[in-house]
Image: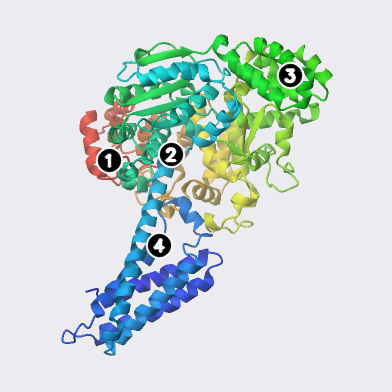
């Protein structure tokens, strides 16, 4: 029988949760008050049962009643439990898990439970037996419903973790180019016989073409074709996008395919339940194992991937695909890429090269479709436009798109005819012509917009971009007088060079070829050379502007009274706040990895944000660092409480910052209880700066820390050492460095992998944050 004392304690916990929830949730105070009132009554009844019940008293059905009460309370506790997901916890401030009808049903059931227990204690057991059975059935039904809902929510969390990027939007946009035409059927005619040939050694069908040839459009046609085939063969697809760093991560590609396969068998995601709770980067081998097992369960699967060349690590991705085809005969790939030198994967490929003879038909159909939707173009003559645009495109679909956009903007049919005689000969000249038409007064704004869109590591929202482009060096405040109004103005300024996606409110370059032109020698030698740019030149500007934004006086505690990010209006009032906080250090880390350095002014900004007490006589405070921690750590308060500037400088590989911190007496080398101690543990897994530097392969930072006396044998919360992570990463340089400084432990990869697995237990893949 349920223990009334223990049940009363559970009710107390539930009441406490409700009160805490009430501080955050909006518009549910009346419902919360009613629930607390009814639960308080139940707790009083349970305490009476505890006080009056003795072993000599007949049960009279009270055991069933208490069991039902416990089931009810357990269900409510589950639904009121704080979410493990940062996003879900953030949403708690405006999401209440109960609808009005549910609350009414819960209150009625609680009232009946109270009444039944009181009646049983008064000796009226016979009169409530039938009602007890009805209540029991209702509660069992409720438990089943809640259990199903919890499982669904858990699956959704795992899906978001494995596949942070959805391919659906990119696919829909690609399909919109050819819908209503027969574009891409030439590739389908090659694809179908390949699909029909089972057991072929050519398990990868590779479509090769230059940038702008229209590979993405053709791949989307292939996806739709496979979708129409019998369901015996499963289909998963993904698009690598040049303007979205997350879509270029090999892990996210495999994760997306796993999530798509889970639509056929949801249990595929079950092994990731514990791993998801850690929210750490998964080993690629773990994802490969899961994908092979999933395909073996669901049957033959076609994995489609567009733009392999846009992947962050193209070589690693090709090796991964090769391993998958060797391990599982039911896995086959359809991929697209720009051409690359033959390698081992080439032996598994059936290659299809895109040339004018393949693409001209698609371009003609596209041109005719655009003309058919424009009375002006039709008036100028459909065949005349086709006869000029198609041959001059020379197989470049993107070039044809640009020219049709240009022609569609003409005001008269006569202007269309004249424009057809002046079409630029290449994409470079097409984009430079657009830039030439930019008014002199707005050119600095246009260049700034193009810089952010070329080198941002994720798509920017319209509001983020409009905010970013107005940041000036030394700026101390941001208000509406500084901002571009309305934000949509940036679209007008860069018409023809950028694309806006309404579904996500994001803006991007119209095509990767726009960035290629901005980085080309041709633009530097042209009359619009001021638009020329490079990543090396622009990254310090992006870092400096991001730090300037984070150091605005607007975020000083004197003006911003946000004690918790969930209650903070910064994301709403300062739309660039999220990107600046989360991405400046990523830009800085990648800049250093490419062999570049920082100017003194940029290093000073970094130290100001990190809250170093004094730099070159300039006093700084810790509130800037605390603000940054709130952005990147969210609700992980324990990690934020133990966070130190040295740890996060080491984590992001900011070698100059680490060196100055160590050399200028800002670090303690003697007192392990001092938060400035060189081996002070921070982060999700309680790691030292040296451990996280070794895990993230920042050898220069690791060398600095070791030179200043960091312990090479320190371990994290799981007992894993610096050497363990270096061996796991197969980083021979760091392994050698650690051994020279006295690190102890095995260096056999298999032995270390088994040791890590054993320590992590079920949470395979946990790593330092």
Q: Quadrant of residue 740?
A: top left
Where disc 1 sits, the SS reads loop
> Residue 11: x percent and y percent?
36, 73
Q: Can residue 37 be seen here?
A: yes
Disc 1 crowd, CA 10 A, few/some/many (<14, 14-19, 20+): many
Q: Nearer the viewer, residue 351 or 554?
A: 351
Using the image, determine if residue 706 lies above or below residue 7: above
Q: Is residue 640 left or right of residue 198?
A: right
10 Å neighbourhood of mark 2: few (<14), some, or many (≥20)?
A: many
Give the residue pinned by disc 1. Answer: 720
Tell me the residue at 34%/12% (across/down): 347
592 is higher (above) or lower (below) than 564: above
Label 3 secondary element: helix
Q: Which of the two discs, 2 and 4, labels the residue nearer the N terminus?
A: 4
In the picture as drawn, the residue positioned furthest to the left comes out as 56
- Residue corresponding to mark 4: 79
Residue 208 screen position, x and y as percent:
48, 15
Marks 1 and 2, Cα distance to the nearest angstrom? 28 Å
Q: Which mark is residue 433?
A: 3
Q: Is residue 411 left or right of residue 700?
A: right
Drawn side of residue 643 relative to residue 126, left or right: right
Name the residue at 42% across, 48% down. 156
**How many numbered discs sit on the rendered protein?**
4
Q: Nearer the viewer, mark 3 or mark 4?
A: 4
Residue 163's label in the rendered image is: 2
Report the front residue among 700 and 154.
Answer: 154
């Amino acid at each position: 029988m349920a223990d009334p004392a223990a049940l009363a304690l559970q009710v107390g916990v539930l009441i406490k949760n409700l009160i805490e929830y009430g501080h955050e949730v909006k518009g549910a105070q009346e419902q919360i008050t009613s629930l607390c009132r009814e639960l308080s009554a139940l707790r009083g009844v349970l305490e009476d049962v505890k006080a009056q019940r003795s072993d000599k008293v007949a049960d009279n059905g009270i055991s069933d009643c208490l069991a039902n009460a416990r089931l009810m309370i357990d269900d409510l506790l589950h639904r009121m439990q704080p979410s493990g997901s940062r996003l879900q916890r953030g949403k708690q401030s405006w999401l209440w898990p109960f609808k009005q009808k549910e609350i009414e049903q819960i209150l009625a059931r609680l009232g009946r439970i109270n009444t039944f227990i009181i009646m049983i204690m008064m000796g009226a057991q016979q009169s409530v037996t039938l009602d007890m059975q009805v209540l029991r059935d209702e509660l069992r039904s409720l438990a089943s419903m809640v259990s199903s809902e919890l499982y669904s929510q858990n699956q959704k969390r795992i899906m978001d973790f494995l596949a942070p990027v959805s391919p659906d939007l990119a696919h829909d946009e690609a399909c919109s180019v050819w819908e209503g035409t027969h574009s891409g059927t030439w590739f389908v005619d090659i694809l179908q016989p390949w699909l029909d040939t089972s057991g072929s050694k050519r398990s990868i069908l590779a479509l090769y073409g230059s940038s702008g040839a229209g590979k993405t459009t053709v791949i989307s046609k292939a996806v739709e074709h496979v979708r129409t085939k019998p369901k015996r063969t499963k289909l998963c697809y993904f698009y690598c996008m040049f303007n979205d760093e997350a879509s270029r991560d090999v892990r996210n590609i495999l994760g997306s395919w796993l999530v798509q396969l889970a639509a056929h068998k949801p249990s595929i995601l079950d092994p990731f339940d514990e791993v998801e709770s850690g929210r750490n980067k998964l080993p690629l081998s773990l994802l490969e194992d899961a994908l092979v097992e999933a395909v073996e369960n669901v049957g033959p699967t076609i994995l489609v991937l567009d733009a392999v060349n846009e992947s962050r690590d193209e070589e690693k991705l090709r090796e991964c695909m090769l391993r998958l085809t060797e391990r599982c005969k039911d896995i086959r790939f359809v991929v697209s890429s720009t051409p690359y030198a033959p390698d081992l994967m080439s032996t598994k490929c059936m290659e299809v090269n895109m040339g004018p003879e393949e693409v001209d038909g698609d371009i003609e159909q596209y041109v005719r479709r655009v003309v058919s939707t424009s009375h002006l173009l039709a008036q100028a003559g459909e065949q005349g436009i086709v006869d000029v645009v198609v041959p001059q495109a020379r197989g470049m679909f993107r070039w044809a798109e640009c020219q049709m956009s240009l022609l569609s903007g003409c005001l008269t049919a006569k202007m269309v005819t004249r424009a057809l005689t002046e079409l630029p000969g290449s994409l470079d000249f097409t984009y430079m012509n657009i830039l030439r038409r930019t008014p002199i007064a707005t050119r600095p704004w246009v260049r700034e917009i193009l810089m952010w869109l070329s080198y941002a590591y994720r798509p920017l929202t319209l509001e983020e971009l409009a905010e970013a482009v107005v940041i000036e060096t030394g700026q101390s405040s941001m208000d509406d007088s500084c901002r571009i109004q309305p934000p949509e103005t940036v679209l007008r300024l860069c018409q023809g060079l950028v694309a806006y996606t309404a579904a996500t409110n994001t803006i991007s370059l119209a095509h990767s070829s726009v960035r290629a032109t901005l980085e080309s020698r041709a633009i530097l030698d042209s009359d619009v050379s001021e638009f020329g740019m490079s990543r090396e030149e622009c990254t310090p500007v992006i870092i400096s502007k991001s730090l300037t934004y984070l150091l605005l006086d607007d975020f000083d505690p004197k003006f911003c009274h946000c004690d918790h990010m969930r209650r903070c209006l910064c994301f709403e009032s300062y739309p660039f706040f999220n990107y600046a906080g989360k991405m400046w250090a990523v830009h800085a880390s990648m800049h250093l990895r490419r062999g570049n350095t920082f100017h003194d002014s940029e290093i000073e900004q970094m130290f100001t944000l990190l809250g170093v007490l004094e730099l070159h006589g300039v006093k700084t405070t810790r509130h800037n660092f605390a603000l940054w921690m709130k952005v990147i750590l969210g609700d992980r308060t324990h990690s934020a409480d133990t966070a130190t500037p040295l740890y996060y400088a080491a984590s992001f590989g900011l070698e100059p910052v680490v060196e100055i911190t160590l050399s200028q007496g800002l670090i303690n080398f003697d007192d392990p209880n001092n938060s400035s101690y060189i081996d002070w543990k921070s982060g999700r897994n309680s790691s030292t700066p040296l451990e996280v530097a070794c895990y993230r392969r920042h050898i220069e930072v690791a060398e600095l820390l070791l030179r200043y006396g960091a312990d090479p044998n320190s371990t994290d919360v799981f007992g894993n050492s610096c050497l363990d992570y270096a061996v796991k990463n197969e980083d021979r340089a760091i392994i050698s460095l650690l051994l020279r400084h006295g690190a102890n432990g095995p260096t056999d990869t298999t032995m270390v992998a088994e040791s890590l697995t054993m320590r992590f237990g079920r949470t395979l893949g946990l790593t330092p944050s």
